[in-house]
Image (cartoon, grey):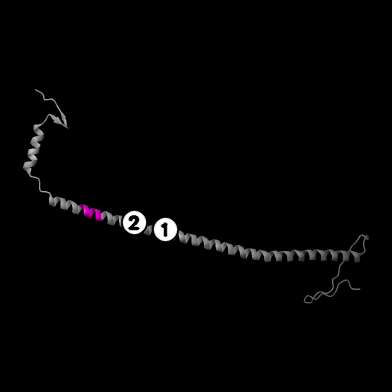
Amino acid sequence: MKAQSDFDPTGKPNKYYFNVESTGALKPENIILMGIAALKKKLSDLQNQLSMEAQSGEKTVREDSQRRQSEKTVREDSQRRQERRQERRQERRQTEKTDREDRQRRHSSRSEQASRRSESVSRRSEPVRSEQVSSRSEQVSSRPEQVRGQSVPQQR
């Protein structure tokens, strides 16, 4: 009997040879069968884990897609709010500019009206004669006893 098969490096393996050592408590065939059973159980557990991860991966993919969609919606909402704020700022600036222009127009029209009034008043009034001014000053200087509406006793 051959201990090993002929080796073909390009071929597909179809036979496996094991050397089994035992203390004699179990037969070598039982040791091999129990090893194969343990290997099958481990492979089955691995397969179950992979399928659960694949299912949770699909859930994760779905959840990621939903999360990305939600984040996109949040970004779009934020962008719309920012655009609305900018529009309101521009409207306020435009309103303030219009108000300033209106105030300037009103102020300039008041100034023009005031200057027209002063011109019309100056045209209406006659120039003050120097004689009238001097007579008034004489009247004031001839009454030293009255200061600010109070009478002051004269000194003798």
Q: Which residues are magenta?
A: 109-114
Residue 13 in picture, x, y percent from top left? 81, 74
Which residue is disc 2 drawn over? 99
Going by the image, does 64 lie left or right of 153? right
Going by the image, does 81 lie left or right of 46? left
Residue 25 in picture, x, y percent from top left? 93, 60
The N terminus: image quadrant: bottom right
On screen, residue 130 above or below 103: above
Residue 129 in picture, x, y percent from top left? 7, 44
**At numbered mark 2, what does the secondary structure look like: helix, strand or loop?**
helix
Which residue is disc 1 drawn over? 89
Residue located 6% across and 42% down the image: 131
* Dot 1 alpha-carbon crowd within 10 angstroms: few under 14, some 14 to 19, many 20 or more: few
Residue located 9% across and 38% down the image: 136
In front of the other: 135 or 19:
135
On screen, residue 70 above or below 3: above
Q: Residue furthest left?
A: 131
What secondary structure characterizes most of the magenta part? Answer: helix
Going by the image, does 25 lie left or right of 72? right
Does 111 appear in magenta? yes
Residue located 22% across and 54% down the image: 113
